[in-house]
Image: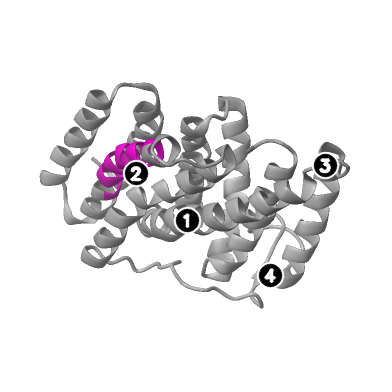
Amino acid sequence: MNKTNTLFIVAIVFVTSVILVQTTPIYIGLAAALLVAMFYLFSSNDNKGVLLTITLYIAGFWISFYLASFFRYSINASAETEIILSRFSLLGYIAPLSVLAMIYKTKTNYVSAGSFSSTVRPLIWRGFPEPVWRFLIVFSLVAIASFSFAIDFHREDFYLLLYYGLLFALVNSVLEELLWRGYMLSRFVDYFGEKLGLVVTSLGFGLYHYSIGFPWLICISFSLFGMLMGGMAIKSNGLLPVIVMHFVMNVLFALSGMIF
């Protein structure tokens, strides 16, 4: 089998796995993980790292699922606090993938601060070049202006909602970026190359949101946003700039009623 066909099959396996674990009982998800792990045993060394990544992602989903259930139902706290604490369940993905990154090291590594002075383009590889810091300012202003029509600034509990939104955004943006643009994108760029690796990772990122209550159409829109954030990680060679983007969007999601 040639390299192109192998890349296509692995990409399909990953995206299918992301959908499968969210829509089927645990035994089917674990059977899928076992099947991918068996492919690992008979695979060439070039494929081992990415196949193990997919296997650990599937297992990580169920670890994360039960951690989230614990935070939601075993801790006596407000609904908003439970939602914030439940995002720590992402450690169910991150912990095994971080161990894998130490065993199967990648040439590409976005688990770093990144540069705010690097050049980025609005369409990642196309458009007028801008330094990352200026792009983030423009992005934030446009995002705030776009969401301002959906935010009730006069509600009595606005500042309490803002407080919860800031906490949620801090936890979620750091952990999701560490997972998706840190470990997943680094592995997939190494294996698929920058452009295909970005597309495959972003599809997974968007579609995985179905498990936390978003409809498929919104998940697809998250995939498109994931490409922008992944492009930022690639161009800045790290996570801090994309964490800023993610943080801003999460605060706006919270204030507009999408989270709480």
Tell me where residue 105 appears, x and y as whole percent. Answer: 27, 67
Task: Tell me the CA gap for discs 4 and 3.
Answer: 37 Å
Q: Residue type at mark 2?
A: Leu
Who comes first in sequence, dot 4 or dot 1?
4
Sequence-earlier tag: 3 or 2: 2
The amino acid type found where label 3 is placed reads Glu
- Choose mark 4 or mark 2, whichever is in front: 4
Instruction: Tell me the residue that label 4 is attached to.
Output: 132
Q: Which mark is residue 156?
A: 3
Instruction: Give the residues in magenta.
Output: 53-69
The disc labelled 4 sits on which kind of residue? Val
Q: Earlier in the sequence, mark 4 or mark 2?
A: 2
Query: Of the residues shown, which amino acid type is indicated by label 1?
Result: Leu
What residue sits right under mark 2 in the picture? 7
Return the residue nearer the eye: 246 or 163. Answer: 163
- Tag 2 secondary structure: helix
In 3D space, how far apart are the residues under numbered discs 3 and 2 (Cα atoms)?
53 Å
Q: Residue at x 17, y 41 (%)?
A: 37
Q: Is residue 122 left or right of residue 152?
A: left
Q: Position of residue 182 (x, y in %)?
A: 44, 60
